Amino acid sequence: MHTMKCSRKPKILWPGISAEVTAFTFDEKGYYGNDNSHLIISGDMYLLGVLNSTLMRFFLKNLCDKVQGDFYRLKISYIEQMP
């Protein structure tokens, strides 16, 4: 039930594995992710812009694990290290 309450709030979502490290998106409609997606409960559009910035792309490409097919693993532990 806690997940339902959380899903109705504005949030920033991103996939656990992606070809693009700055794959953050805003959700205000209450969509659910799968077991390989992450979220920050926030409606802060400035934060979303920072997460998708060129500087963060550089930072994450040098921090995240690369997996098969030149995809990046965007673990929450990596996102937490962002300045």
Image: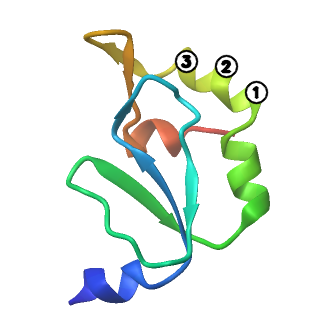
- Residue 10: percent from left, percent from top: 56, 77
Give the CA distance from mark 1 to mark 2: 5 Å
Do callouts 1 and 2 mark residues in contact (Cβ within 8 Å)? yes
The image quadrant where one finds the C terminus is: top right
- Residue marked by disc 2: 58
Kind of residue at badge 1: Leu
Q: Secondary structure at mark 1?
A: helix
Crowding near the residue tagged with mark 2, few <14, some 14–19, many ≥20 C-alpha atoms within 10 Å = few
Specify whether 36 is left or right of 48.
left
Q: What whole-number distance in Å separates the C-alpha atoms at marks 3 and 1?
A: 10 Å
Between the C-alphas of marks 3 and 2, the distance is 5 Å
The residue positioned farthest toward the top in the image shown: 69
Tell whether label 2 touches label 3 (CB within 8 Å).
yes
Q: Quadrant of the N terminus?
A: bottom left
Residue sitting at x 39%, y 71%: 31
Q: Which three-letter amino acid code belongs to the residue tagged 2? A: Phe
Horizontal side of residue 37 vs 21, given as left or right: left
- Image position of 23 with respect to 30: above or below: above
Residue 3 located left or right of residue 50: left
Q: Secondary structure at mark 3?
A: helix
Q: Tally the marks.
A: 3
Q: Please state the horizontal and vertical placement of residue 20, each as a whole percent of the image.
A: 51, 26
Q: Residue at x 68, y 40 (%)?
A: 52
Mark 3: few/some/many CA within 10 Å (<14, 14-19, 20+): some
Pointer 1: residues within 10 angstroms few (<14), some, or many (20+)?
few
17 or 29, nearer to the observer: 29
Q: Secondary structure at mark 2?
A: helix
Query: Which residue, given by chain and number where applicable, does mark 3 sit on?
Result: 61
Q: Which mark is residue 68?
A: none
Choose top left, top right, bottom left or bottom right for residue 18: top left
